[in-house]
Amino acid sequence: MQPVGRRGTLAVAGLPAAPTNHYRRTQQPGDRSGRHTSPAVSARVENTIQSAYWERSPVDLSAAIETAAEALVVVWGRAQDSTRQPVSSSQLRALLAVERLGEINLNGLAEELGSIPSSASRLCDRLQAAGLISRTTGRTDRREVVLSLTSDGHSLLGAMRSARRAEIGRVLAAMPHEDQHALLAALVSFQTATER
């Protein structure tokens, strides 16, 4: 027997069932733009998810997750753009790495970002010019340059997280309670797998 979601669509491996109303309103509170989800995009999401279930192929499943995650990326980007000082994705990764580690030298940051030191240095030049990171001399090695977040850098990341949570909260409010928890469980599992 094929698994059936609450709305009569296939429920795939922990992914919420795709809605059958392919043309649905996505207007946010206070937003009068009247944006809608394209029927073609919604149909592509459902078709990819259903294909992944029936084919049971890792490639198809990856494609289904990628397609479903596009909405999260859009929400994420919208929150990032709403901050008073938008930063690029590479700059954000650098800021998050410095925040997570507290202090880090240039070579360590380059390794965290998977880039070469010269590229990381140019990235830090831009972040320092924006007042988001500082460079100081190492305590034990005077030749070493240590990177750390400034107060503005901490404030930017805090504001960005608040904006993200507000955007995500608006979307979650439109989801059934059980789907909210299923989404959290799946994302936690995905995060754990990336750290292995």
Image: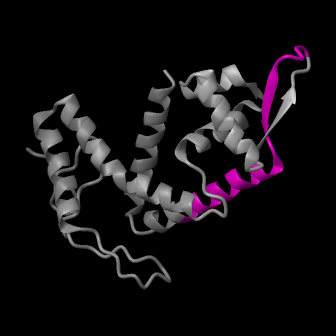
The residue that appears at 53% across and 45% down in the rendered structure is 89
Residue ranking furthest to the top: 141
Left of 1 or right of it: where is 182?
Answer: right
Give percent across and percent down for residue 98: 71, 34
Residue 19 vs 184, above or below: the answer is below
In the rendered view, would you say 48 is above or below 93?
Answer: below
Q: Quadrant of residue 54?
A: top left
Across and down, in percent, residue 5 comes to 21, 55
| Left or right: where 74 falls relative to 130 | left
Q: Nearer the viewer, residue 122 or 62?
A: 122
Q: Residue at x 86, y 30 (%)?
A: 136
Magenta extent: 140-166
Q: Quadrant of residue 46?
A: bottom left
The residue lying at 91 percent from left, 20 percent from top is 139
Residue 173: horizontal and vertical position, in percent?
Answer: 45, 68
Residue 172 visible (yes or no): yes
For residue 14, say whether it is visible. Answer: no
Q: Is residue 58 magenta?
A: no
Residue 18: quarter of image:
bottom left
* Number of numbered tags placed on the structure image: 0
Q: How is the image coloured?
A: one colour
The x and y percentages for residue 128 are 75, 43
Quarter of the image for the N terminus: give it: top left
Residue drawn where x is 63% and y is 37% of the image: 123
Q: Is residue 108 above or below residue 7?
A: above
Give the farthest residue toward the left: 1
Name the side, left or right, on which 182 lies relative to 94: left
Does residue 179 sit above or below 13 in this rendering? below
